[in-house]
Image (cartoon, rainbow, N blue to C red):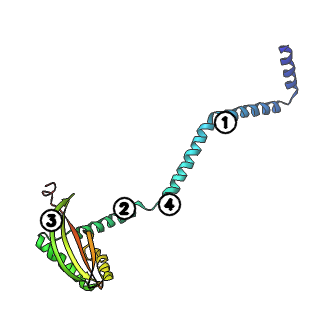
Amino acid sequence: MIKILTKSISQALGKLNPHLVFGLMLFFVLLLAFEGWILLLRKPYAEYQQILSTRESLTASLRQMPDQSSELGRIAAELKQLSDKLSGELRLPASDDKMAASLMEALDQSAGLHSVTLASLKPKERKQVSVFEEVSFEVSAKGSYLRLCAWMLDFEKTLGNSATVTEFDMKTADEGKQVTLSMNIALYRPLRLNEVGK
């Protein structure tokens, strides 16, 4: 049966044009090669396409990011400015007498600008807070309520960020026309390395 089938196929092919037979054989060979390419190279080609798309997206995101060197320069300038400001604010007089005099002068000038009377300034005990020395003063002043509030709001400009009001108390005086203010102000100055931990 197979011999008859093979014989009939070869007779049919023998009747065909040899160029047509060669063309059909070439077509089938090319079809098999294309099918093999699809089966074998499809996965590596897909991975290659994914790598290309990832590279393009990374390039696009890098273009959108700001220039790192200018950003680092800006941050370094801000850090230096903050460091200079902090060291300037923490450069308080070394001795307690000079610190009290400097504080009294700053508060008195500020009180005069706000029409407030500075009544007294008394030093309190000193203590260590982390790597700073906390020097406290008891301050009392007299004036109208709103002027005293404006004077206290101006403390950051007067004393800098190294000073803190730890407690305050207001009481009316002179039949409610004046207010007496008493408060504790703490100043912080950095300790020397040999003083830390004592």
Residue projecting furthest to the front: 175
Amino acid type of the residue tagged 1 in the rendering: Ile
Q: Earlier in the sequence, mark 4 or mark 1?
A: 1
Residue 110 in view in this figure? no
* Element on which disc 1 rests: helix
Residue 197 in view in this figure? yes
The reply to whether callout 3 and callout 4 are in contact (CB within 8 Å) is no
Q: Nearer the viewer, mark 3 or mark 4?
A: 3
Badge count: 4
The reply to whether callout 1 and callout 2 are in contact (CB within 8 Å) is no
Residue holding disc 2? 72
**How far apart are the two marked residues, 3 and 2, measured between alpha carbons?**
44 Å
**How far apart are the two marked residues, 4 and 1, measured between alpha carbons?**
38 Å
User: Where, quadrant-wise, is the C terminus in this rendering?
Assistant: bottom left
Residue holding disc 4? 64
2 or 123, which lies in front?
A: 123
Q: Is residue 124 above or below residue 44?
A: below
Whole-percent x and y of residue 9? 85, 22
Q: Nearer the viewer, mark 3 or mark 2?
A: 3
